Image (tube, rainbow, N blue to C red):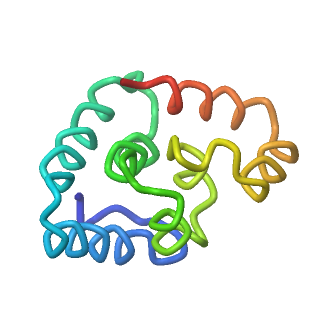
Amino acid sequence: MNGSWLVRSNLKEHAAEWIDYLAALADGRLEKSCLLARQFCDLRRPDDDPKPWFYAGLFRLATAAEAGQFLSTHRVTKATVPSMLEDPDVQLWLDRVGPETHELMARLRSAR
């Protein structure tokens, strides 16, 4: 995680809490989540902001309950978590965003 990034709603702190949570849980997701964060950044276009890509990868393996806990105030990242695809709040938010956000969300959701 780049400590110099400016992010909203304490996303940097919530990501650090997520990493600490995964480390304590020791279920094998910490290493994979960090790898996904790096891989997602490599998938972005050169002119893309790296932050949505990094956080989408970092939280990719979160369960719906975990996404609710760590991403309650982070709509973009929460909407990229596969376990949240059918969440009513995520769907409502997606219904209200513009075409550029829809395009970014499609790219983030399809990243592997």
**Residue at the (30%, 35%) spot, across then down:** 41
Q: Quadrant of residue 37?
A: top left
Lateral position of residue 95 relative to residue 7, left or right: right
Tally the numbered discs: 0
Counting from the top left corner in percent of width and height, residue 12 is at: 36, 70
Lateral position of residue 100 relative to residue 65, left or right: right
Residue closest to the eye, 94 or 49: 94
- Quadrant where the N terminus sits is bottom left
**Residue at the (19%, 49%) spot, across then down:** 34
Q: Quick check: 85 above or below 46? A: below
Residue closest to the eye, 44 or 37: 37
- Quadrant where the C terminus sits is top left
Residue closest to the eye, 59 or 11: 59
Lateral position of residue 105 relative to residue 90, left or right: left
Lateral position of residue 106 relative to residue 52, left or right: right
Counting from the top left corner in percent of width and height, residue 35 is at: 17, 40
Q: Quick check: 6 above or below 98? A: below
Counting from the top left corner in percent of width and height, residue 66 is at: 45, 66
Q: Quick check: 39 above or below 82? A: above
Counting from the top left corner in percent of width and height, residue 60 is at: 39, 45
**Residue at the (41%, 66%) spot, across then down:** 6
